[in-house]
Amino acid sequence: MSVFGQPFRFAVVSIAAVLASFGVLYALCRALEVNATPAILAATLALSLSRGMGIPNLRKFAAQLVLLPLIALSAGLVGTALLKLPPVGAILFIVGIVVSILLRKHGPVARTIGRIVATPLIAILVVPVRIEGIAGRWLPVALMLAAGLTAMMCSAGAAWLADRIGWIQADLGQSGPASKVPESAGRPLHIAERMALQMFVALGLAFVIGMNVFPTHWAWVVLTAFIVCSGTVSRGDAVYKGLMRLGGAIGGAVLAAAMAHVALMEPVAGAAAIFAIVFVGTWLRQINYAWWAVCATLIFALLQGPQDEAILSALGMRIVCILIGALCGIAAAWFVYPIRTEQLVRKRVAETLLGLRDALASGLAPDMSELDRLAAELDRLAPPLRLHRRLVGSANTLTHPSAWIDRAQALIAQARNADFDRAELRTQMRELGAMLKAYSPGPARRNQATANVAD
Protein backbone atom coordinates (compact mmCIF):
# COMPACT_ATOMS: atom_id res chain seq x y z
CA MET A 1 0.00 0.00 0.00
CA SER A 2 1.48 3.33 -1.06
CA VAL A 3 1.91 5.78 1.79
CA PHE A 4 1.07 8.76 -0.42
CA GLY A 5 -1.84 7.10 -2.21
CA GLN A 6 -5.37 6.59 -0.94
CA PRO A 7 -4.40 6.64 2.78
CA PHE A 8 -2.95 10.15 2.43
CA ARG A 9 -6.01 11.47 0.56
CA PHE A 10 -8.32 9.86 3.07
CA ALA A 11 -6.43 11.56 5.92
CA VAL A 12 -6.62 14.96 4.19
CA VAL A 13 -10.42 14.72 3.80
CA SER A 14 -10.81 13.45 7.37
CA ILE A 15 -8.79 16.26 8.93
CA ALA A 16 -10.73 18.80 6.85
CA ALA A 17 -13.99 17.52 8.38
CA VAL A 18 -12.46 17.51 11.86
CA LEU A 19 -11.11 21.07 11.56
CA ALA A 20 -14.38 22.40 10.17
CA SER A 21 -16.41 20.77 12.96
CA PHE A 22 -14.06 22.01 15.64
CA GLY A 23 -13.91 25.52 14.18
CA VAL A 24 -17.68 26.01 14.03
CA LEU A 25 -18.26 24.82 17.61
CA TYR A 26 -15.20 26.61 18.95
CA ALA A 27 -16.45 29.92 17.54
CA LEU A 28 -19.83 29.27 19.14
CA CYS A 29 -18.22 28.42 22.49
CA ARG A 30 -16.12 31.60 22.36
CA ALA A 31 -19.22 33.66 21.64
CA LEU A 32 -20.94 32.10 24.67
CA GLU A 33 -17.77 32.40 26.80
CA VAL A 34 -17.60 28.70 27.66
CA ASN A 35 -14.74 26.23 27.29
CA ALA A 36 -14.07 24.23 24.15
CA THR A 37 -15.13 20.73 25.19
CA PRO A 38 -18.25 20.79 22.93
CA ALA A 39 -15.90 21.60 20.04
CA ILE A 40 -13.70 18.63 20.94
CA LEU A 41 -16.80 16.44 21.01
CA ALA A 42 -17.80 17.67 17.53
CA ALA A 43 -14.28 16.96 16.22
CA THR A 44 -14.26 13.38 17.56
CA LEU A 45 -17.68 12.69 16.03
CA ALA A 46 -16.48 14.05 12.68
CA LEU A 47 -13.39 11.83 12.86
CA SER A 48 -15.59 8.79 13.46
CA LEU A 49 -17.96 9.67 10.63
CA SER A 50 -15.12 10.29 8.21
CA ARG A 51 -13.91 6.71 8.58
CA GLY A 52 -16.85 5.68 6.41
CA MET A 53 -16.00 8.48 3.95
CA GLY A 54 -19.47 8.46 2.46
CA ILE A 55 -22.11 10.87 1.26
CA PRO A 56 -25.20 9.63 3.14
CA ASN A 57 -28.30 8.78 1.16
CA LEU A 58 -31.65 10.16 2.29
CA ARG A 59 -32.38 7.32 4.70
CA LYS A 60 -28.94 7.39 6.27
CA PHE A 61 -28.98 11.19 6.44
CA ALA A 62 -32.33 11.18 8.26
CA ALA A 63 -31.05 8.58 10.73
CA GLN A 64 -27.92 10.62 11.43
CA LEU A 65 -29.95 13.81 11.74
CA VAL A 66 -31.93 12.27 14.59
CA LEU A 67 -29.30 10.09 16.23
CA LEU A 68 -26.07 12.09 16.12
CA PRO A 69 -27.26 14.99 18.31
CA LEU A 70 -28.70 12.49 20.79
CA ILE A 71 -25.44 10.53 20.82
CA ALA A 72 -23.47 13.71 21.46
CA LEU A 73 -25.85 14.67 24.27
CA SER A 74 -25.63 11.22 25.84
CA ALA A 75 -21.83 11.28 25.71
CA GLY A 76 -21.87 14.69 27.42
CA LEU A 77 -24.08 13.34 30.20
CA VAL A 78 -21.79 10.33 30.69
CA GLY A 79 -18.80 12.67 30.89
CA THR A 80 -20.55 14.76 33.52
CA ALA A 81 -21.35 11.61 35.50
CA LEU A 82 -17.70 10.51 35.37
CA LEU A 83 -16.74 13.85 36.95
CA LYS A 84 -19.40 14.03 39.67
CA LEU A 85 -20.33 10.37 40.32
CA PRO A 86 -17.49 8.23 38.95
CA PRO A 87 -19.06 4.79 39.72
CA VAL A 88 -22.30 5.80 37.99
CA GLY A 89 -20.35 7.27 35.09
CA ALA A 90 -18.34 4.06 34.76
CA ILE A 91 -21.52 1.97 34.59
CA LEU A 92 -23.06 4.26 31.99
CA PHE A 93 -19.82 4.22 29.98
CA ILE A 94 -19.65 0.42 29.95
CA VAL A 95 -23.32 0.13 28.97
CA GLY A 96 -22.82 2.59 26.11
CA ILE A 97 -19.79 0.72 24.73
CA VAL A 98 -21.47 -2.68 25.06
CA VAL A 99 -24.58 -1.43 23.25
CA SER A 100 -22.41 0.01 20.46
CA ILE A 101 -20.91 -3.46 19.93
CA LEU A 102 -24.26 -5.26 20.01
CA LEU A 103 -25.50 -2.97 17.23
CA ARG A 104 -23.11 -4.77 14.86
CA LYS A 105 -25.63 -7.60 14.67
CA HIS A 106 -28.07 -5.46 12.74
CA GLY A 107 -26.40 -4.53 9.47
CA PRO A 108 -24.00 -1.89 8.13
CA VAL A 109 -26.05 1.17 9.15
CA ALA A 110 -26.31 -0.10 12.73
CA ARG A 111 -22.56 -0.85 12.73
CA THR A 112 -21.87 2.74 11.68
CA ILE A 113 -24.11 4.03 14.46
CA GLY A 114 -22.34 1.78 16.94
CA ARG A 115 -18.96 3.19 15.95
CA ILE A 116 -20.30 6.72 16.28
CA VAL A 117 -21.67 5.89 19.75
CA ALA A 118 -18.28 4.61 20.93
CA THR A 119 -16.08 7.45 19.65
CA PRO A 120 -17.30 10.35 21.83
CA LEU A 121 -17.43 8.07 24.86
CA ILE A 122 -13.74 7.32 24.40
CA ALA A 123 -12.98 11.02 23.94
CA ILE A 124 -14.64 12.02 27.21
CA LEU A 125 -12.33 9.68 29.12
CA VAL A 126 -9.60 12.26 28.70
CA VAL A 127 -11.59 15.44 28.16
CA PRO A 128 -14.77 15.17 30.26
CA VAL A 129 -17.47 17.62 29.25
CA ARG A 130 -17.24 20.79 31.32
CA ILE A 131 -19.58 23.59 30.28
CA GLU A 132 -19.17 26.40 32.76
CA GLY A 133 -20.35 29.97 32.83
CA ILE A 134 -23.75 29.39 31.20
CA ALA A 135 -26.84 30.70 32.91
CA GLY A 136 -29.75 28.36 32.38
CA ARG A 137 -30.37 24.65 32.02
CA TRP A 138 -30.94 24.11 28.33
CA LEU A 139 -28.02 25.85 26.65
CA PRO A 140 -25.51 23.10 27.56
CA VAL A 141 -27.94 20.59 26.05
CA ALA A 142 -28.20 22.74 22.92
CA LEU A 143 -24.41 22.82 22.59
CA MET A 144 -24.21 19.03 22.74
CA LEU A 145 -26.93 18.74 20.09
CA ALA A 146 -25.12 21.32 17.95
CA ALA A 147 -21.92 19.28 18.19
CA GLY A 148 -23.65 16.25 16.66
CA LEU A 149 -25.30 18.23 13.87
CA THR A 150 -22.11 20.09 13.01
CA ALA A 151 -20.06 16.89 12.83
CA MET A 152 -22.60 15.28 10.51
CA MET A 153 -22.79 18.24 8.14
CA CYS A 154 -19.01 18.80 8.00
CA SER A 155 -18.11 15.14 7.40
CA ALA A 156 -20.74 14.77 4.67
CA GLY A 157 -19.68 18.07 3.11
CA ALA A 158 -16.00 17.11 3.08
CA ALA A 159 -16.78 13.76 1.44
CA TRP A 160 -19.02 15.44 -1.16
CA LEU A 161 -16.42 18.07 -2.04
CA ALA A 162 -13.60 15.52 -2.26
CA ASP A 163 -15.72 13.37 -4.55
CA ARG A 164 -16.63 16.34 -6.77
CA ILE A 165 -13.02 17.36 -7.34
CA GLY A 166 -11.95 13.76 -7.93
CA TRP A 167 -9.73 13.58 -4.85
CA ILE A 168 -11.39 10.40 -3.61
CA GLN A 169 -14.30 8.25 -4.70
CA ALA A 170 -16.80 8.61 -1.88
CA ASP A 171 -19.31 5.91 -1.07
CA LEU A 172 -22.61 7.49 -2.07
CA GLY A 173 -24.56 5.81 0.69
CA GLN A 174 -24.15 2.34 -0.80
CA SER A 175 -22.58 -0.45 1.14
CA GLY A 176 -19.83 -2.49 -0.40
CA PRO A 177 -19.55 -6.23 -0.08
CA ALA A 178 -20.24 -7.21 3.47
CA SER A 179 -17.44 -8.74 5.43
CA LYS A 180 -18.39 -11.99 7.06
CA VAL A 181 -17.78 -12.01 10.78
CA PRO A 182 -16.29 -15.10 12.38
CA GLU A 183 -18.68 -17.38 14.17
CA SER A 184 -17.86 -19.14 17.39
CA ALA A 185 -17.70 -22.77 16.38
CA GLY A 186 -19.88 -24.87 18.63
CA ARG A 187 -21.14 -21.87 20.58
CA PRO A 188 -24.61 -20.32 20.38
CA LEU A 189 -23.44 -16.72 20.74
CA HIS A 190 -23.35 -14.31 17.83
CA ILE A 191 -19.89 -12.81 17.31
CA ALA A 192 -21.15 -9.38 18.41
CA GLU A 193 -22.51 -10.88 21.64
CA ARG A 194 -19.18 -12.58 22.30
CA MET A 195 -17.28 -9.34 21.70
CA ALA A 196 -19.73 -7.41 23.90
CA LEU A 197 -19.20 -9.85 26.79
CA GLN A 198 -15.44 -9.62 26.38
CA MET A 199 -15.59 -5.82 26.35
CA PHE A 200 -17.86 -5.82 29.42
CA VAL A 201 -15.31 -7.87 31.36
CA ALA A 202 -12.30 -5.89 30.07
CA LEU A 203 -13.82 -2.49 30.91
CA GLY A 204 -15.16 -3.71 34.24
CA LEU A 205 -11.70 -4.88 35.27
CA ALA A 206 -10.11 -1.69 33.97
CA PHE A 207 -12.47 0.62 35.85
CA VAL A 208 -12.19 -1.32 39.11
CA ILE A 209 -8.40 -1.49 38.99
CA GLY A 210 -7.92 1.98 37.57
CA MET A 211 -10.20 3.93 39.89
CA ASN A 212 -8.99 2.11 43.00
CA VAL A 213 -5.27 1.74 42.30
CA PHE A 214 -4.60 4.70 39.98
CA PRO A 215 -7.22 7.31 40.90
CA THR A 216 -5.54 10.10 38.92
CA HIS A 217 -4.59 7.98 35.89
CA TRP A 218 -7.47 5.50 35.62
CA ALA A 219 -8.45 6.78 32.15
CA TRP A 220 -5.23 5.33 30.70
CA VAL A 221 -6.12 1.87 32.01
CA VAL A 222 -9.67 2.02 30.63
CA LEU A 223 -8.62 3.48 27.27
CA THR A 224 -6.01 0.75 26.70
CA ALA A 225 -8.39 -2.03 27.70
CA PHE A 226 -10.90 -0.71 25.17
CA ILE A 227 -8.34 -0.46 22.35
CA VAL A 228 -6.95 -3.96 22.92
CA CYS A 229 -10.35 -5.62 23.24
CA SER A 230 -12.12 -3.67 20.49
CA GLY A 231 -12.66 -5.74 17.35
CA THR A 232 -10.47 -8.58 18.59
CA VAL A 233 -11.19 -11.73 16.59
CA SER A 234 -9.00 -14.25 18.42
CA ARG A 235 -6.61 -14.75 21.30
CA GLY A 236 -3.58 -14.09 19.13
CA ASP A 237 -5.13 -10.91 17.78
CA ALA A 238 -5.63 -9.62 21.32
CA VAL A 239 -2.01 -10.30 22.27
CA TYR A 240 -0.77 -8.68 19.06
CA LYS A 241 -2.86 -5.57 19.58
CA GLY A 242 -1.70 -5.41 23.19
CA LEU A 243 1.95 -5.47 22.08
CA MET A 244 1.34 -2.88 19.36
CA ARG A 245 -0.55 -0.66 21.80
CA LEU A 246 2.16 -0.99 24.46
CA GLY A 247 5.01 -0.32 22.03
CA GLY A 248 3.22 2.60 20.42
CA ALA A 249 2.14 3.97 23.77
CA ILE A 250 5.68 4.00 25.09
CA GLY A 251 6.78 6.01 22.08
CA GLY A 252 3.78 8.33 22.36
CA ALA A 253 4.21 8.81 26.09
CA VAL A 254 7.88 9.73 25.66
CA LEU A 255 6.99 12.29 22.99
CA ALA A 256 4.14 13.63 25.13
CA ALA A 257 6.47 14.08 28.09
CA ALA A 258 8.88 16.04 25.91
CA MET A 259 6.18 18.23 24.35
CA ALA A 260 4.07 18.85 27.44
CA HIS A 261 6.86 19.27 30.02
CA VAL A 262 9.86 20.49 28.08
CA ALA A 263 8.42 22.57 25.27
CA LEU A 264 5.53 23.86 27.43
CA MET A 265 3.53 24.86 24.39
CA GLU A 266 1.05 27.71 24.34
CA PRO A 267 -2.62 26.69 23.87
CA VAL A 268 -2.68 27.67 20.19
CA ALA A 269 0.51 25.76 19.46
CA GLY A 270 -0.78 22.81 21.45
CA ALA A 271 -4.04 22.74 19.46
CA ALA A 272 -2.12 22.92 16.18
CA ALA A 273 0.11 20.05 17.30
CA ILE A 274 -2.90 17.91 18.26
CA PHE A 275 -4.58 18.40 14.88
CA ALA A 276 -1.32 17.63 13.10
CA ILE A 277 -1.00 14.42 15.12
CA VAL A 278 -4.61 13.48 14.31
CA PHE A 279 -3.78 13.87 10.62
CA VAL A 280 -0.62 11.76 10.84
CA GLY A 281 -2.39 9.09 12.91
CA THR A 282 -5.33 8.88 10.50
CA TRP A 283 -2.92 8.66 7.58
CA LEU A 284 -0.55 6.02 8.96
CA ARG A 285 -3.20 3.95 10.72
CA GLN A 286 -4.02 2.38 7.37
CA ILE A 287 -0.38 1.36 7.00
CA ASN A 288 0.21 -0.08 10.48
CA TYR A 289 -1.80 0.09 13.68
CA ALA A 290 1.28 0.81 15.78
CA TRP A 291 1.47 4.30 14.28
CA TRP A 292 -2.06 5.03 15.44
CA ALA A 293 -1.15 3.79 18.92
CA VAL A 294 1.73 6.28 19.05
CA CYS A 295 -0.43 9.16 17.84
CA ALA A 296 -3.46 8.31 20.02
CA THR A 297 -1.30 8.15 23.16
CA LEU A 298 0.32 11.45 22.29
CA ILE A 299 -3.05 13.13 21.61
CA PHE A 300 -4.60 12.00 24.88
CA ALA A 301 -1.51 13.00 26.85
CA LEU A 302 -1.55 16.49 25.35
CA LEU A 303 -5.30 16.88 25.92
CA GLN A 304 -4.78 16.16 29.60
CA GLY A 305 -2.41 19.11 29.80
CA PRO A 306 0.70 19.56 31.98
CA GLN A 307 0.90 17.29 35.01
CA ASP A 308 2.10 18.21 38.48
CA GLU A 309 4.26 15.08 38.64
CA ALA A 310 7.87 14.89 37.57
CA ILE A 311 8.42 13.91 33.95
CA LEU A 312 9.84 10.45 34.63
CA SER A 313 7.22 9.70 37.27
CA ALA A 314 4.35 10.65 34.96
CA LEU A 315 5.88 8.72 32.07
CA GLY A 316 6.40 5.63 34.17
CA MET A 317 2.88 5.79 35.60
CA ARG A 318 1.34 6.06 32.14
CA ILE A 319 3.28 3.06 30.87
CA VAL A 320 2.26 0.99 33.92
CA CYS A 321 -1.40 1.95 33.40
CA ILE A 322 -1.18 1.08 29.70
CA LEU A 323 0.37 -2.30 30.54
CA ILE A 324 -2.38 -3.10 33.06
CA GLY A 325 -5.08 -1.99 30.63
CA ALA A 326 -3.59 -4.20 27.90
CA LEU A 327 -3.60 -7.15 30.31
CA CYS A 328 -7.28 -6.51 31.10
CA GLY A 329 -8.13 -6.62 27.39
CA ILE A 330 -6.02 -9.72 26.74
CA ALA A 331 -7.48 -11.54 29.75
CA ALA A 332 -11.03 -10.89 28.56
CA ALA A 333 -10.25 -12.14 25.04
CA TRP A 334 -8.38 -15.14 26.42
CA PHE A 335 -10.93 -16.43 28.93
CA VAL A 336 -14.39 -15.08 27.94
CA TYR A 337 -15.77 -17.13 25.04
CA PRO A 338 -12.34 -17.26 23.41
CA ILE A 339 -11.59 -18.19 19.82
CA ARG A 340 -8.29 -19.95 19.14
CA THR A 341 -6.28 -18.26 16.41
CA GLU A 342 -5.50 -21.52 14.59
CA GLN A 343 -9.18 -22.46 14.59
CA LEU A 344 -10.10 -19.15 12.95
CA VAL A 345 -7.29 -19.46 10.38
CA ARG A 346 -8.59 -22.89 9.38
CA LYS A 347 -12.06 -21.46 8.92
CA ARG A 348 -10.87 -18.53 6.80
CA VAL A 349 -8.59 -20.67 4.61
CA ALA A 350 -11.39 -23.19 4.15
CA GLU A 351 -13.76 -20.39 3.11
CA THR A 352 -11.17 -19.23 0.57
CA LEU A 353 -10.83 -22.72 -0.90
CA LEU A 354 -14.59 -23.18 -1.07
CA GLY A 355 -15.05 -19.82 -2.78
CA LEU A 356 -12.40 -20.65 -5.37
CA ARG A 357 -13.80 -24.15 -5.87
CA ASP A 358 -17.29 -22.78 -6.55
CA ALA A 359 -15.87 -20.26 -9.04
CA LEU A 360 -13.98 -22.98 -10.90
CA ALA A 361 -17.01 -25.27 -10.93
CA SER A 362 -19.16 -22.58 -12.56
CA GLY A 363 -16.71 -22.13 -15.42
CA LEU A 364 -17.06 -18.35 -15.11
CA ALA A 365 -14.44 -15.78 -14.13
CA PRO A 366 -14.13 -15.43 -10.33
CA ASP A 367 -16.06 -12.60 -8.69
CA MET A 368 -13.43 -9.95 -7.95
CA SER A 369 -15.42 -8.42 -5.09
CA GLU A 370 -15.58 -11.84 -3.44
CA LEU A 371 -11.84 -12.32 -3.96
CA ASP A 372 -11.26 -8.91 -2.36
CA ARG A 373 -13.34 -9.92 0.64
CA LEU A 374 -11.53 -13.22 1.07
CA ALA A 375 -8.14 -11.52 0.78
CA ALA A 376 -9.14 -8.87 3.33
CA GLU A 377 -10.22 -11.54 5.82
CA LEU A 378 -6.87 -13.30 5.45
CA ASP A 379 -4.96 -10.02 5.77
CA ARG A 380 -6.86 -9.33 9.00
CA LEU A 381 -5.51 -12.53 10.58
CA ALA A 382 -1.97 -12.47 9.21
CA PRO A 383 0.01 -9.91 11.32
CA PRO A 384 -0.02 -11.68 14.72
CA LEU A 385 0.75 -15.03 13.10
CA ARG A 386 3.67 -13.68 11.11
CA LEU A 387 5.04 -12.01 14.23
CA HIS A 388 4.69 -15.31 16.11
CA ARG A 389 6.55 -17.17 13.37
CA ARG A 390 9.40 -14.65 13.45
CA LEU A 391 9.71 -14.71 17.25
CA VAL A 392 9.10 -18.39 18.00
CA GLY A 393 9.59 -20.16 14.70
CA SER A 394 8.21 -23.56 13.79
CA ALA A 395 9.75 -27.00 13.43
CA ASN A 396 8.01 -27.27 10.06
CA THR A 397 7.14 -23.94 8.46
CA LEU A 398 4.44 -25.59 6.35
CA THR A 399 2.47 -26.46 9.49
CA HIS A 400 2.46 -22.91 10.84
CA PRO A 401 -0.91 -21.15 10.32
CA SER A 402 0.82 -18.14 8.74
CA ALA A 403 2.05 -20.44 5.96
CA TRP A 404 -1.54 -21.51 5.24
CA ILE A 405 -2.54 -17.85 4.95
CA ASP A 406 0.38 -17.16 2.59
CA ARG A 407 -0.60 -20.07 0.34
CA ALA A 408 -4.28 -19.06 0.34
CA GLN A 409 -3.34 -15.51 -0.61
CA ALA A 410 -1.15 -16.86 -3.43
CA LEU A 411 -4.15 -18.82 -4.75
CA ILE A 412 -6.27 -15.66 -4.74
CA ALA A 413 -3.52 -13.79 -6.59
CA GLN A 414 -3.48 -16.49 -9.27
CA ALA A 415 -7.25 -16.38 -9.66
CA ARG A 416 -7.10 -12.63 -10.31
CA ASN A 417 -5.21 -13.21 -13.57
CA ALA A 418 -7.53 -13.43 -16.54
CA ASP A 419 -5.52 -16.29 -18.09
CA PHE A 420 -4.84 -18.34 -14.97
CA ASP A 421 -4.31 -22.10 -15.33
CA ARG A 422 -7.43 -23.73 -13.86
CA ALA A 423 -5.86 -27.18 -13.65
CA GLU A 424 -2.79 -25.88 -11.81
CA LEU A 425 -4.98 -23.86 -9.45
CA ARG A 426 -7.08 -26.94 -8.64
CA THR A 427 -3.91 -28.92 -7.91
CA GLN A 428 -2.62 -26.31 -5.48
CA MET A 429 -6.03 -26.04 -3.83
CA ARG A 430 -6.08 -29.81 -3.23
CA GLU A 431 -2.58 -29.64 -1.75
CA LEU A 432 -3.58 -26.91 0.69
CA GLY A 433 -6.82 -28.67 1.61
CA ALA A 434 -4.94 -31.91 2.22
CA MET A 435 -2.46 -30.04 4.42
CA LEU A 436 -5.27 -28.65 6.56
CA LYS A 437 -6.70 -32.15 6.96
CA ALA A 438 -3.31 -33.69 7.77
CA TYR A 439 -2.63 -31.19 10.57
CA SER A 440 -6.18 -31.04 11.88
CA PRO A 441 -6.44 -31.25 15.70
CA GLY A 442 -8.78 -34.23 15.39
CA PRO A 443 -11.92 -35.45 13.63
CA ALA A 444 -14.23 -34.16 16.33
CA ARG A 445 -12.95 -30.61 16.02
CA ARG A 446 -12.22 -30.56 12.29
CA ASN A 447 -14.00 -27.86 10.37
CA GLN A 448 -16.31 -29.66 7.95
CA ALA A 449 -15.56 -27.11 5.25
CA THR A 450 -11.85 -27.96 5.60
CA ALA A 451 -12.60 -31.62 5.07
CA ASN A 452 -14.67 -30.94 1.97
CA VAL A 453 -12.26 -28.70 0.07
CA ALA A 454 -9.62 -31.39 -0.22
CA ASP A 455 -11.95 -33.80 -2.01
Image (cartoon, rainbow, N blue to C red):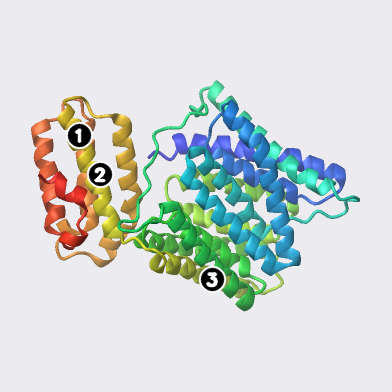
- Which sits earlier in the primary sequence, circle 3 or circle 1? 3
Q: Residue at x 69, y 47 (%)?
A: 72
- The reply to whether residue 28 is in sight is yes
Instruction: Tell me if residue 228 can be seen.
Output: no
Q: Quadrant of residue 49?
A: top right
Q: Which is more foreground, mark 3 or mark 1?
A: 1
Disc 2 from disc 3: Cα separation: 36 Å
Where residue 362 appears, as percent x and y from the top left, is 18, 27
Callout 3 secondary element: helix
Distance Cα–Cα, label 2 vs label 1:
11 Å
Disc 2 residue type? Glu
Residue furthest to the right in view is 135
Q: Residue drawn at (19%, 57%), measured in percent from left and top?
A: 446
Which amino acid, mark 1? Asp
Label drawn at residue 358:
1
Q: Name the residue that disc number 3 marks.
A: 205
Classify residue 210 by image quadrant: bottom right
